[in-house]
Each structure stands twice: as C-alpha cells, then as structure tokens.
Amino acid sequence: MIRQILAQALTTRVKDPRVALVTVTEVTMSADLSHATARVSVMGSDEDKEQAMNGLESARGFLRSVIAGVADLRITPDLHFTLDRGLEHASRIDALLKDLKLSEPRS
C-alpha cells in the first residue's frame, strides 16, 4: 500500500523535476511499522540519480504527510530512500550475454 501511495504521489503531486524519472520498486517496513525504506530506480546518468535522490530527500516530509492523509495507519512511518540498481545490473548482464553470444564461433 505504501509503495502505491508513494508511486502515485511522485507522479501526480510532487512537482520537483528531479524526481520525474523515479520508479518505486519496493517498500519494506520495520517490524513496528515506524520506518519504511523505499527502493527506487532512476533512469539516467549517475548525476541524474544523485539529483533524484536529493529530490526525494527534499520531498520526504511532504510524502510522509501524503501517506498520513491516505493510509489508515496508527503510526505514519518515517521514510528512507535507497537506490535500487537491480535494473542496471540486469541490463548490464544482458548486454554481456549478447556480446558473448555474438563472439562465439559458429559451427
């Protein structure tokens, strides 16, 4: 539920252009539900990723208030953001496998 709220808020309510290319891939909650760690994927260069993370930190309080207004939770979790590099790694592996296949001698 938190992932959906964050994803929708980032696309419709946050006006910061630094977070335009952010995709929320996963949210994990602490055992007491007081902390939420959102893993985010950002398309672009390393500089774009750094800017997006800065934009998310800047919008953290606003996003927390959006969650408080939408979700029926006893405690509104404190938000933390981490960069999810899974898509980057998958793309890199795919490219390496394609290169390997192209370099194999044909029989």
Image (cartoon, helix red, strand yellow):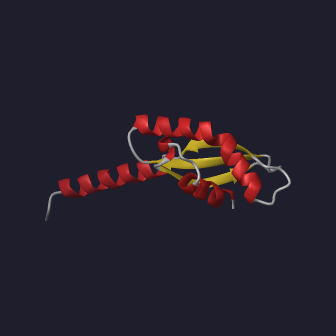
Count all numbered tags in the image, as a single digit: 0
Task: Please state which of residues 99 and 40 is positioned toward the viewer in this rendering.
Answer: 40
Say which residue appears at 79% left-offset and 49% top-offset.
76
Question: Which of these two is toward me, 12 or 92?
Answer: 12
Q: Is residue 88 above or below residue 7?
A: above
The residue at 58%/48% (across/down) is 39
Q: Position of residue 94 (x, y in %)?
A: 34, 55
* Residue 98 x/y as whole percent: 27, 56
Above or below, 106 against 10 in this view is below
- Residue 41: percent from the left, percent from the top? 50, 49
Q: Quadrant of the N terminus?
A: bottom right
Left or right: where 93 falls relative to 55: left
Image location (x, y in percent) of residue 95: 30, 52
Closest to the observer, 81 or 59: 59
Which residue occupies the extreme right position in the image? 74
At x 80%, y 46%, the residue is 34
Vertical placement of 16 versus 25: above or below?
above
